[in-house]
Amino acid sequence: MALERLRLNHRIIGYESLLTQPDKSLRICLEAMALPMQEGVLHPERNQRIPITLSHSQARQPLRTTSIGRWHHLGPASGAQILALFLQAF
C-alpha cells in the first residue's frame, strides 16, 4: 500500500466501522494525532460553526448507518482507485 511504502503514520478505519462504532473509530483517529477525545466529534449536527466545504449540508448531518454497503456495486477495486486519486492530489 502506498501509505506503508511512504512510511506515513496512518490508521485504516473502514467506513462501516466508523458508522457502527464511531466512538472507538474516532478515538483511534484522534489518538493517532495526539488529540483528546471530545464528545462533539460524535455529533457533527450539534456544531454551531458553518463548515467551509461544498458539502456543508452533509457535514452537518448526524452519523447514520443508512449508506453502509452502498458502495459494493462499484466493485472491489473502487476503494483502491479512490485512495490512489486522493494520494495523487498531494
Image (tube, rainbow, N blue to C red):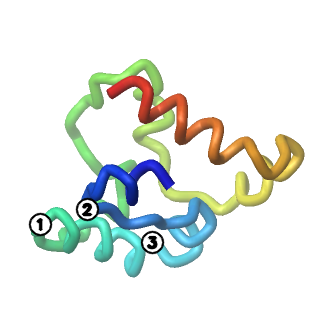
Can you identify the residue that label 2 sits on? 9
Name the secondary structure under disc 3: helix
Q: Residue at x 26, y 29 (%)?
A: 50
Asked which quadrant contains residue 39, the reply is: bottom left
Q: CA separation, marks 1 and 2?
A: 15 Å
Mark 3: amino acid: Pro
Q: CA separation, marks 3 and 2?
A: 21 Å
Q: Residue at x 41, y 27 (%)?
A: 56
In the image, taking residue 2 as reference, residue 40 lies left or right, namely: left
Q: Nearer the viewer, residue 85 or 45?
A: 85
Q: Is residue 62 above or below residue 57?
A: below
Say which label, 3 or 1, has the lower sequence index.
3
Q: Residue at x 45, y 71 (%)?
A: 22
Crowding at mark 1 (Cα within 10 Å: few <14, some 14-19, many 20+): few
Viewer-nearest of labels 3 and 1? 1
In the image, taking residue 48 as reference, residue 57 lies left or right, namely: right
Mark 2: amino acid: Asn
Viewer-nearest of labels 3 and 2? 2
Return the residue found at the far top: 54
Residue 16 percent across, percent down from the top left? 62, 66
Can you identify the residue that label 3 sits on? 22
Name the secondary structure under disc 2: loop
Residue 65 percent across, percent down from the top left? 66, 62
Say which label, 1 or 2, has the lower sequence index.
2
Q: Which mark is residue 35?
A: 1
Q: Quadrant of the C terminus?
A: top left
Crowding at mark 2 (Cα within 10 Å: few <14, some 14-19, many 20+): few
Viewer-nearest of labels 1 and 2? 2
Q: Residue at x 63, y 45 (%)?
A: 80
